Image (cartoon, rainbow, N blue to C red):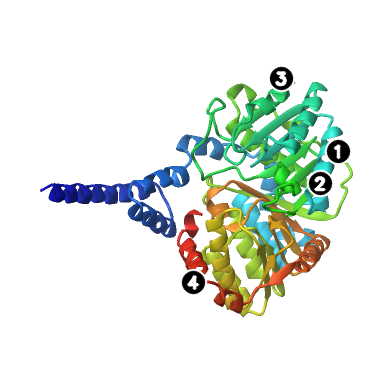
Amino acid sequence: MLRDSLWIIIVTLLIINTFGAIITVFSQKRDIATIWAWLLVLLTLPVVGFFIFFLIGSRISNKKIFRLRTQDMRGLEQIAYNQRQQLEKIEELLPIPDSASELVRLFLTSDDAVLTRGNEIQIFTNGFDKFNALFEDIEHATHHIHLEYFTIYDDKIGNQLIDLLTKKAQEGIEVRIVFDQFGSHGQHRDMYKRLRDAGGIVVPFLMRRFQLLTLRFNFRNHRKIAIIDGTIGYIGGFNVGDQYLGYFKKFGHWRDTHIRIHGDAVLSMQSRFLMDWNATAEAEEVLSETIEYFPEIVQLPGLAMVQIVSSGPDNDMKQIKQGFMRMFASARTEITIQTPYFIPDAAILETLEIAVMSGVRVRLMIPDRPDHPIVYRATQYYAKELIELGAEVYRYDGGFLHSKVVSIDHEIGTVGSANMDIRSFVLNFETNAFVYDPDFAARLEDMFEQDIKDATKLTIEDFEQQSFWLTFLQKFSRLFSPIL
């Protein structure tokens, strides 16, 4: 009798769990692959699966999405409008073939991304060099400093940054910081107190400031940008923390890519920052008059043409993913990719397959160690698939590879916060610089060649010689690709 009652309770709970899973997954719009992945989690892990969904699968509130979507593009509205009206003249501006003009048109249409000229670009692959340059530029700021980072840790380099910003705020310089609370492992009120006391404003992205923590794993602000006086900007893969200087034994040398831009592209970065700021800040901190943050650069310092492109869950266009696909589809000779996480969706993988079959040399470089075990096993699975398609895959052995770089045909290159994975395509707020300049693309490809000296070229035999357990983990992890 007791056993029968127990079975009735178990069956009832399973039925409730099943209906709950279906209602939960279909409550909001999701693509088919994501629906099946979450159903797998919720049905195979009764009760526990709902807790995982709450952490990872819960979406950002419609109210917050509305605040982001209704932000007007700041400072560049008329330029973007004019460029859209004169798309046929884009070819006259660009120094490289049709592949560039097609990409420019795509971003103008999907993201209002202004094509900027006269940019001087410096590339950093070492955290010490990047932070030394950033700190020097902050030291020379005369009007404002705007920072937006996924991660700002309360550690040695994090406090050095806040000390410098506090000093500048005391000098009367406007200091604003947007950070992601989840990526930064908290709000670090004690660290920011001295900066706030000096007049700086620090806000967690789309979060209440009194909220102690966020349990939402997805829909994070993964952007990493800095703007000084509207004339100098930084964008790329480095966050703010000691591990990005190679101080953590777990990761060893931290290999990343970040760029410093001096030129009109900084105004596009400023526009992105101000939109995020106004969607996040309290009513009294919103910036309605912003013309002073868009200074005219009288003498353009460089030659590179740049578009700053953003994407995120506030827009269904997936602009950066579309940009990657357009680059892969238009490549004629070579594609190089560096990414810590290679978890492509079917569209990206098929585009790369077409490129390989068309005779384009495709090269991918991934890390030699995981920072997220399940994600790394899925990366290994897709790396093997790419090798089977005929591409070259390298495992970087010189430390942890966190670089997010794509280049094609020695002509176009992109550096930013977006990884080559579904999370960056759909779940995170990202920003990349797309650069139309043969010299810049050549420098990215030269760095790839240098990294090969510290890398191992992977083969199918390497995967066939793995243990059964490791192969199983890779295949199993791949099932969760849409939600990793």
Residue tagged 2: 128
Query: Is 393 placed left or right of 46 in the picture?
Result: right
Q: Rounded to the nearest whole Å, what is the CA distance between mark 1 and mark 4?
A: 52 Å
Q: Residues within 10 Å of mark 3 (few under 14, many from 20)?
A: few
Q: Which mark is residue 126?
A: none
Q: Quadrant of residue 162?
A: top right
Residue plotted at (81% across, 27% down): 168
Q: Nearer the viewer, residue 110 or 48?
A: 48
Q: Rounded to the nearest whole Å, what is the CA distance between mark 3 and mark 2?
A: 28 Å
Proximity of marks 1 and 4: CB atoms separated by less than 8 Å: no
- Residue 21, position as x, y percentages in the image: 32, 49
Name of the residue lying farthest toward the front? 2
Tag 4: amino acid: Phe
The reply to whether residue 255 is in sight is: no
Q: Nearer the viewer, residue 366 or 472?
A: 472
Q: Secondary structure at mark 4?
A: helix
Residue tagged 4: 468
Tag 1: amino acid: Glu
Tag 2: amino acid: Phe
| Image depth: mark 2 or mark 4 in front | 4
Proximity of marks 1 and 3: CB atoms separated by less than 8 Å: no
Q: Nearer the viewer, residue 270 or 251?
A: 251
Residue tagged 3: 197
Q: Secondary structure at mark 1?
A: helix
Tag 3: amino acid: Asp
- Residue 81, position as x, y percentages in the image: 67, 46
Q: Rounded to the nearest whole Å, what is the CA distance between mark 4 and mark 3?
A: 57 Å
- Residue 459, position as x, y percentages in the image: 63, 77
Q: Which mark is residue 136?
A: 1
